[in-house]
Image (spheres, coloured by chain):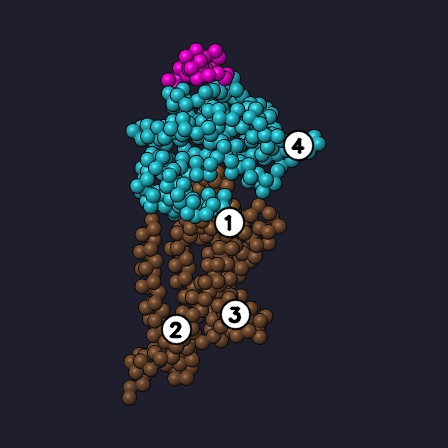
Chain colours: A brown, B cyan
Amino acid sequence: MNENVVWNWEHAAAVLPQLLEGLQITVLATVVGMVIASVLGLLVAIVRRSKLRVVTFPVGFLVEFIRSTPLLVQLVFANLLFAQFPSLAIGCVVLGIHYATYMSEVYRAGIDAVPKGQWEAAIALDLPRSRTWGAVVLPQAIRNTLPGLGNYAISMFKETPFLFAIFVVEMYTAAQQYGADTFRYMEAITMAGLLFLLVSYPTSLLVRRLENRLA
Amino acid sequence: MPENDSTPAIQFQGVGKRFGDNVVLDGLDFAVAKGDRVTLIGPSGSGKTTILRLLMTLEEANDGLIYVDGDCYTHEMRGDKRVAIPEKRRSLVRRRVGMVFQQFNLFPNMTVLENITEAPIHVLGKPKAEAVASAEALLEKVGLADKRDARTMQLSGGQQQRVAIARALAMEPEILLLDEVTSALDPELVADVLGVLRNIAETTDITMLIVTHEMQFAREVSNRVLMFDGGKIIEEAHPDEIFTSPKNERTQEFLRAIL
């Protein structure tokens, strides 16, 4: 058998089952992370609109802090700090919190894009705060944020390989393991890359269509 | 304060409003009796719209007191200190005041009917069936019964404004504020909106405060005209009088310029 070549199709096929298993973890981490990021990001956006500096200042500081430090460092740090929790859970939460700081900006822009007249009409009807947000502002703001949400979901999906650092066996880690076992890194990593592409490219097309539809 | 018909619907007492260094209203005093239809006229920047916005709590006065039907609205005197009234109490007064805006400001994420029933259901706590029934009656009144389930974006400007009028009336306000309600409309759509307002003026006893450039409409509907300039009332009279023989020189100039 010709073992010297850079590319061997048999290995490329053999690594697939492991990669697909890893892909499930990758998708799981992205979905859970995205749910956390969208909910938390919205809360952050709303809290930061408050006029109370005792509230906005600490939240603002935390947001800047999280955005100014690398995701990889945050993952490893959280994993050390909360060693008693499963790494996958920590990974999802850290991804979620990290992206919440970016999502909050998307929400902020979406909320700012709701015309002032909408707020004024809500006041003129004496709507309570909860209805103004829940029935008037957010339904319009969130429409504006859907493309941003989609783009961050794709970018989070592509950053899941960082979970490698805290020993979560997502797709990239699975590829690394196959490489370590067989010394065939090229096939494993290439196939993993192709699978990433296979998921993220169609998703990005979908997001772009959504963007056009909403524009 | 005891309720009786001599209590003015609206009373301003020494009301001042500044935006930075720009004094928009300066120690303004005036009262509007119940059922009055008062038109505010004057050059832009004279403070007319600010008066409506103060009454809707979209702006807050820097000095003075505003009463609605004898009740302190946004501020009250405690001893000789002017203190803000908490939101809960403001809200009880605010819901007796309705406003129609120049830009309609309908909620685009709701249907026409939902726009009208939103506040009666969620502010007044009306049962849904009742709110829907009165919303349908109001749509009938403004001539848009067939648009019940339309999205607001599908309507013309004139139709949107008529929905906005119905939305304000659905709260059964004692006071209705009309802020240049025809200024954003194409000329051919103005008549429908004015027709609806004329009908409301004739069939209800709602107190109205009107800021408009439609002098013919002001003349037909209102029983009092206040001419503003530099944040003060410089002339007030019955419309027949002020439009035909204004006394103040600034009023004469203003009316000459716009008529």
Residue, disc 2: A23
Asked whether the viewer can see residue A110, the reply is: no
Q: Is residue B258 magenta?
A: yes
Q: Amino acid at mark 4?
A: Met
Label 3 sits on a secondary structure element that is: helix
Nearer to us of marks 3 and 1 is: 1
Asked if both marks, 1 and 4, belong to the same chain, the answer given is: no
Q: Please, what is the three-letter code of the amino acid marked with disc 2?
A: Leu
Along the line of sight, the residue nearer the viewer: B137 or A145: B137
Instruction: Identify the amino acid type marked 3.
Output: Ile
Residue position marked by numbered label 1 in the rendering: A130
Q: Amino acid at mark 1?
A: Ser
Q: Which residue is mark 4?
A: B77
Q: Chain of mark 4?
A: B
Question: Residue A161, relative to residue B247: is it above or below?
Answer: below
Residue A158 rendering spot, x and y as whole percentages: 40, 66
Q: Which residue is mark 3?
A: A90
Q: Nearer the viewer, residue A94 or A197?
A: A94
- The Cα atoms of the two marked residues, 2 and 3, are separated by 18 Å
